[in-house]
Image: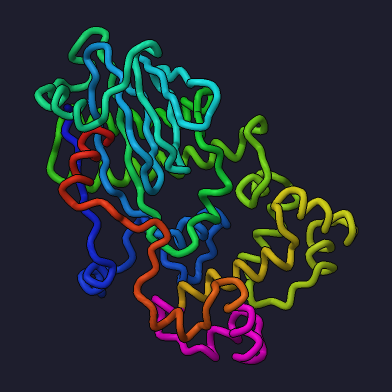
Amino acid sequence: MIGPIVLPLKNPETQKSETQGLGTPPWQPDLGSSQRMDPLSEVLALMKPQVYVSGGFAVLGDMAIHFPKHQGIKCYAMLAGQCWLVVEGVPEPVLLHAGDCFLLPRGFPFQLTTDLSLEPVHYTVALSQLGMRNEAPGASEGARYMAGGHFALTGGHSEMLLHSLPPIVHIRRESDKAAMRWSLERMREELRNPQPGGSLIAQQLAYTMLIQALRLHLTDAASAGRGWLSALSDKHMSIAIASMHSDPGYPWTLQSLAERVGMSRSVFALHFRETVGATPMEYLTRWRMLLAADRLKNSPDGLSAIAQSLGYESESAFGKAFRRIMGCSPRQYTRSGPPCAIPVRQGAEDHEQELVVTG
């Protein structure tokens, strides 16, 4: 086992009080900043990814490991060797080579195996078999090493991101692997030679790998599918989405958005729906409500100020839109507990054990 770094999730209210006055962590950008972020960065900020764990593990012999359904996103890379990735519901296994990176955003059960003919064992069994091995990457001939992170999306409505991704995002093109190489090499070095501050560096490297993998997925035309994430790689649709994100309170209309991207109204409406899976006005309303939900929980702004900043002339009109999208009134949402679209249902001890194996 190579020094996994386990970071138990805290109660959101406790975490909020502990970090008050310390500024926004680098992996949770401040949505109130005057500097505009791109749409992917803004959505990730709303989803508030937190690292369950970052680190790596080694498999020095033939083994097939079964991992049950998980919550959040797992992002890993092969540092050395190769193995098979088998995800439930995906017809074909994926052969991972050194330098490959992959995301598992849907939480489906999966297997990592050196041989497809092997009978998989549960990760808890694998933990006991791997627990005494602590060789660093490159120490053993023929060994297989994997590193990365497991992320919880603690913001509300994280399906906006997760449902826009396939069950496996596999980064395997040589040009793409070259773009990931710096992060992978730094992660390898942190695992090989732990230093003071290594836990925080490993967190940031894992998060960088996640963002870089999403970015590379966007540029891969072969992986393009329906959804707002894929639409960010479309020249015209990305302009429309960026426009709505940069000024959500502007009174956008189908006509004004079509003019912004240089298309006719009818062609723009059809192309947006086919690409994103929703009409432009549906997307705009949903984005406004996601922003409103975040501000209701995390800002001192009153209901009237939030409504006006998002383009609604009255609290009544805003409330109707919020209830339609979020399923409850703004005041009910404010009084409810901290949102957690992907709650942690495992006990801390069991969860930590899984992370040591997967991490």
The one of 274 and 80 positioned closer to us in this rendering: 274
Q: What secondary structure is the stretch in magenta mostly built from?
A: helix
Vertical placement of 36 versus 211: above or below?
below
The one of 277 and 253 positioned closer to us in this rendering: 277
* Image quadrant containing the N terminus: top left
Q: Is residue 313 magenta?
A: yes
Image spot of residue 164 (x, y percent) = 58, 47
Which residue is pictured at 39% across the width and 48% down the height? 72
The one of 253 and 32 positioned closer to us in this rendering: 253
Image spot of residue 305 (x, y percent) = 53, 88
Q: Which residues are magenta?
A: 296-321
Q: Quick check: 204 left or right of 254?
A: left
Which residue is pictured at 44% across the width and 32% down the height? 102
Residue 343, quarter of picture:
bottom left
Residue, far left: 132
Which residue is pictured at 50% across the width and 66% down the height? 35
Which residue is pictured at 47% across the width and 86% down the height? 331
* Image quadrant containing the C terminus: top left
Image spot of residue 98 (x, y percent) = 38, 18
Q: Is residue 320 magenta?
A: yes
Vertical placement of 77 versus 232: above or below?
above
Image spot of residue 169 (x, y percent) = 51, 34
The one of 337 and 68 positioned closer to us in this rendering: 68
Vertical placement of 181 versus 199: above or below?
above
Q: How is the image coloured?
A: rainbow
Residue 353, quarter of picture:
top left
Residue, far front: 119
Q: Quick check: 200 left or right of 24?
A: left
Number of labels in the image equals 0
Residue 190, quarter of picture:
top left
